[in-house]
Amino acid sequence: MLTSDVAGAVVAIPSRTTTTGMVEYRGASGSIPAYLARPSGDGAWPAVVVIHDLFGLMDHTRDIAERFAYEGYVTLAPNLFASPELAAVLTPANVQKAMAFMFRLPRRDPVLAQQELAKLPPDERAIIAPTVERLVGGLPKERFSKDLVAAVNHLKTLPFVKGDRIGCVGFCFGGGLSIRLACDVGVEACVVFYGENPSPIERVRDIAGPVLGLYGAEDTRINADLDKLVKAMADYKKDFEMRIYPGAPHAFFNDRNPTTYREAAARDAWDRVLRFYRRTLMA
């Protein structure tokens, strides 16, 4: 095993090879393409479902899946936007433009959004309007949740997966789906990176395993409801750990986005996730 000195701390780097590639599994909406990464060789390992953000199954998500594989986990990262009606609209470029438009708005106001859309040049409006419509209210989250439950069930069929040691992690949009997955099925551990609360919040009672929540202090929209999550976790006596990083915005973990990436917070969050999974999935 190699070691590396990062910010004064010695971090272990496993000398492990991995096997990666695209696979398909059967979901609620048909065949779901997914990126699979796992340690090479014989044996069975704990597994993690990695849930992408609003930009879809991009290099950032695949990189996270590979990083977990180096640590000794099988990872499955489904492409939830692969269906034709979503893939045509939710391209990374379209989502980038739509998110930039929404971030310019002072508040979430459908009337204001329509007024501002009307001011855009026709070619921009033709791209941004349907994308915003999808992102704000047109995402089939119930279908996504069923597809993620199917991902857990698929992992349980694989001979190199320990079926009783499966967790999940999600980012942004995927963070909300991660905790929703923990409500839907008995995963052993759930990690939420700056994701929305389950709705209704009482669904927390159905969570079986420990939950780790990681948030940026500057992410005011997500953080506005964190008190409700903390109260629900306490009321239902759940194993819940939370960390809020001072000065960190939404998407602080995404090292492909220099605008939001915060290295110190991201490194600490990664270390916390690994310790959390060692406690819950490796034990």
Image (cartoon, grey):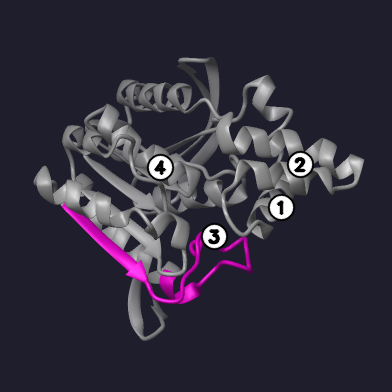
Residue lying at 19% horizontally and 46% vertically, measured from the top left: 232
Magenta stretch, main secondary structure, is loop
Mark found first going from the N terminus, 1 or 4: 1
The residue that disc 4 covers is 176
The residue that disc 2 covers is 128
Magenta residues span 240-265
Q: Which mark is residue 101?
A: 1
Q: Secondary structure at mark 4?
A: helix
Mark found first going from the N terminus, 3 or 2: 2
Residue lying at 31% horizontally and 55% vertically, measured from the top left: 226
Residue lying at 34% horizontally and 67% vertically, measured from the top left: 244
Identify residue type, mark 4: Gly
Q: Which mark is residue 254?
A: 3
Marks 2 and 1 in Cβ contact (< 8 Å):
yes
Q: Nearer the viewer, residue 93 or 228?
A: 228
65 left or right, relative to 233: right
Identify residue type, mark 1: Phe
Distance CA(mark 2)–CA(mark 1): 8 Å
| Neighbourhood count class around disc 3 (C-alpha, 10 Å): few under 14, some 14–19, many 20 upward | some
